[in-house]
Image: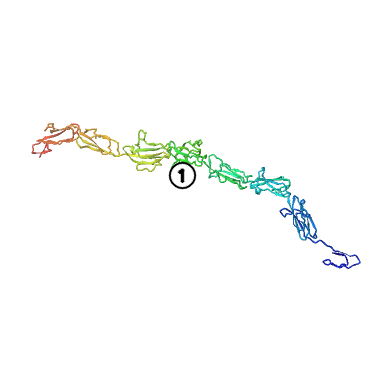
């Protein structure tokens, strides 16, 4: 109430009671009334099926419910209608007035009147978006029309079709689907077919508004860069590349499969044609994959290298690890197409020099040089190279076979005309051995004595038979074998008086010591007064007997001598007193003779002649005894000597 116009009014109570005292002037008291408060009327403009407000009430910046304040409005009414005209892109669907007790029945457009009541009332208008044209979103490989993205519910990549039904005016926030497209990365976006699209961001984010016109957005992708696939071709066990690796560039290939294939290399074969990762997918960038094809050289034939003495198949070279000379065998396993550099091994074969090489058995050999250097390439078949060597020349070895104590050669070497030294040529023999021994078997009648090897510096200590071994060197060497004649039987020479075994001269004993094979000659002795009867007895010449004694007997008879005539004369005369005695000299030369005087009666020997006894000589001799007649006296005769009488007178 307002009592400002009634100055006689008392202060009103809370209910407006006042007392007014009349005054001289006009007084005005104004009681004021207001409608009772009613409940509010809330009008929602929902998207059908939601509680999303669509209508922006006056003064509101965002869609909200219309709120009709019921303050002071009890009994009043509000005329309501749909706000489709004010809600872009939506159309009226229906109205729900079940929450408004004071509402009139809505017409087809949802127009209704709601009377304020004591309680709150709610009217819900429902709208749905108008249909818009579809938005088509492609996710292409750049430069193609190949779809990459598989929309939800699809089993294969295809365009994303965003249905425009009920979406007019709504926006679609689009972005690239790289996160959902394995192995691809966003490149760019083409919104030229979408007239509502906002300017895309660097990642292709854009917003489209559903309109009545169909719109198309194209996202472009390219495969991400992957790691490279590096294909190596190596030799088994060595890691030596057979060619530079092949690099399968992973640029733009993430997720793509790769397939590698082995190369063909002359002389090689694959160990495995399908390494574990020979196929697969390109790896992530920075994680290269290495595919390794391992090859091994094909097996080739062996190369056999012989080191022969020329003209023989005698091996000369000792390969490493061998204790005896043997062929070098180069195993061809895994070596097809490789080569072996060969040369002569003269430096390793003592005392030999290189002569030539024969490569006709090695089809992979190149032409050898003057030293026999050649290269042989392994091929499918076995190959043989023959090196030939000859012994170097050494100095000669001279072997003497001499009679001990002389320089007389005893042995006749093969081809020689007479005894001479053995000259063992050193040509082609350096380092070889010569086994020497005595030649007593080839030297009749001699026996081995000793050997002198002081002139042979390589000689081994001789055996008891003189066996020794010399090695041919570059210095001359001399060996001297010494022999002596064997001992054999003796030759005994007798000088007998013919018909007897009476020795006329000492026996001669021709000793057989050291005389084997020698000849002997005997001669009759010169025996005074004798003449040999048999000048050439059996065995008078010959060869010393091997055993026993050869006896040679010379027989002699005495020579005839002159006779010895013994005279017995009267002294001073040649008057014989007795007949002469003649001592026959036949066969008596040199024998003694003895004469005696005669016992002649009445005579006395004057003297014994000087040659009364003597030796038969070649001439006649005379022995004269002289007697003289005795004086008459007494004489006695006594026999003397058996033939003559000695007269002794006294």
User: Which residue is situated farthest in the right direction here?
Assistant: 24
- In the rendered view of the protein, which quadrant contains the N terminus? bottom right
Residue 390's x, y, as percent?
Answer: 44, 37
Residue 485's x, y, as percent?
Answer: 31, 38
Task: Tally the numbered discs.
Answer: 1
Residue 71's x, y, as percent?
Answer: 79, 60
On the question of residue 283 being in view, the answer is yes
Residue 461's x, y, as percent?
Answer: 38, 43
Residue at coordinates 36% horizontally, 34% vertically from top-left?
Answer: 414
Q: Nearer the viewer, residue 359 or 157?
A: 157
Q: Nearer the viewer, residue 285 or 508?
A: 285
Q: Residues within 10 Å of mark 1 (few under 14, many from 20)?
A: few
Question: Is residue 513 shown left or right of residue 103?
Answer: left
Q: Nearer the viewer, residue 565 or 607?
A: 565
Question: Is residue 397 shown left or right of residue 297?
Answer: left
Instruction: Please name the colour scheme applied to the rendered image.
Output: rainbow
On the question of residue 125 being in view, the answer is no
Identify the secondary structure beneath mark 1: loop
- In the rendered view of the protein, which quadrant contains the C terminus? top left
Where 645 sits versus 173, above or below?
Answer: above
Query: Pointer 1: what residue?
Result: 321
């Amino acid at each position: 109430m307002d009592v400002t116009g009634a100055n006689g009014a008392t202060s009103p109570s809370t209910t407006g009671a006042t007392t007014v005292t009349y005054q001289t002037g006009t007084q005005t008291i104004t009681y004021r009334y207001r409608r009772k408060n009613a409940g509010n009327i809330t009008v929602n403009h929902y998207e059908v099926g939601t509680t999303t407000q669509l209508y922006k009430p006056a003064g509101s910046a965002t869609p909200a419910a219309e709120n009709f304040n019921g303050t002071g409005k009890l009994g009043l009414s509000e005329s309501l209608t749909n706000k489709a005209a004010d809600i872009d892109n939506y159309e009226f669907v229906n109205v729900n007035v079940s929450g408004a007790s004071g509402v009139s029945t809505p017409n087809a457009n949802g127009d209704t009147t709601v009377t304020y009541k004591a309680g709150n009332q709610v009217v819900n208008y429902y709208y749905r978006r108008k249909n818009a044209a579809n938005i088509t979103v492609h996710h292409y490989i750049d430069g193609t029309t190949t779809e990459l993205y598989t929309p939800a519910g699809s089993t294969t990549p295809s365009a994303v079709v965003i249905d425009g039904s009920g979406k007019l005016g709504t926006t679609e926030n689009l972005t690239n689907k790289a996160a959902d497209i394995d192995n691809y990365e966003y490149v760019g976006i083409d919104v030229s077919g979408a007239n509502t699209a906002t300017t895309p961001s660097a990642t292709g984010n854009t917003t489209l508004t559903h309109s009545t016109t169909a719109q198309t957005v194209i996202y472009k992708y390219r495969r991400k860069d992957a790691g490279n696939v590096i294909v190596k071709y190596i030799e088994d066990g060595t890691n030596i590349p057979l060619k530079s690796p092949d690099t399968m560039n992973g640029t733009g290939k993430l997720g793509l499969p790769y397939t590698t294939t082995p190369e063909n290399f002359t002389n090689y074969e694959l160990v495995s044609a399908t390494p574990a990762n020979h196929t697969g997918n390109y790896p992530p960038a920075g994680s290269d994959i290495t595919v390794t094809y391992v090859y091994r050289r094909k097996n080739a034939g062996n190369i056999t290298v012989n080191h022969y003495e020329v003209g023989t198949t005698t091996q000369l070279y000792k390969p490493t690890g061998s204790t005896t000379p043997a062929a070098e065998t180069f195993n061809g396993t895994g070596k097809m197409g490789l080569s072996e550099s060969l040369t002569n091994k003269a430096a390793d074969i003592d005392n030999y020099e290189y002569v030539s090489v024969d490569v006709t058995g090695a089809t992979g050999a190149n032409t050898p040089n003057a030293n026999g250097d050649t290269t042989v390439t392994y091929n499918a078949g076995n190959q043989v190279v023959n090196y030939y060597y000859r012994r170097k020349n050494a100095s000669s070895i001279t072997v003497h076979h001499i009679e001990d104590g002389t320089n007389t050669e005893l042995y006749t070497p093969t081809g020689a005309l007479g005894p001479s030294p053995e000259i063992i040529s050193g040509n082609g023999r350096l380092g070889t051995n010569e086994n020497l021994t005595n030649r007593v078997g080839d030297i009749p009648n001699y026996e081995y004595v000793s050997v002198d090897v002081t002139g042979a510096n390589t000689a081994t200590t001789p055996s008891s038979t003189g066996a020794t071994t010399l090695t041919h060197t570059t210095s001359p060497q001399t060996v001297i074998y010494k022999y002596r004649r064997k001992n054999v039987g003796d030759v005994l020479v007798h000088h007998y008086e013919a018909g007897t075994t009476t020795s006329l001269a000492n026996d001669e004993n021709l000793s057989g010591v050291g005389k084997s094979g020698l000849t002997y000659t005997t001669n009759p002795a010169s025996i005074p007064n004798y003449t040999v009867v048999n000048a050439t007895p059996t065995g008078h010449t010959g060869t010393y007997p091997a055993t026993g004694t050869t006896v040679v007997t010379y027989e002699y008879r005495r020579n005839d001598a002159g006779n010895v005539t013994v005279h017995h004369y009267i002294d001073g005369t040649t008057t014989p007193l007795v007949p002469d005695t003649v001592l026959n000299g036949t066969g008596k030369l040199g024998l003694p003779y003895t004469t005696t005087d005669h016992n002649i009666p009445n005579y006395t020997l004057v003297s014994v002649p000087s040659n009364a006894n003597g030796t038969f000589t070649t001439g006649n001799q005379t022995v004269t005894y002289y007697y003289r007649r005795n004086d008459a006296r007494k004489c006695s005769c006594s026999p003397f000597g058996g033939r003559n009488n000695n007269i002794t007178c006294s």
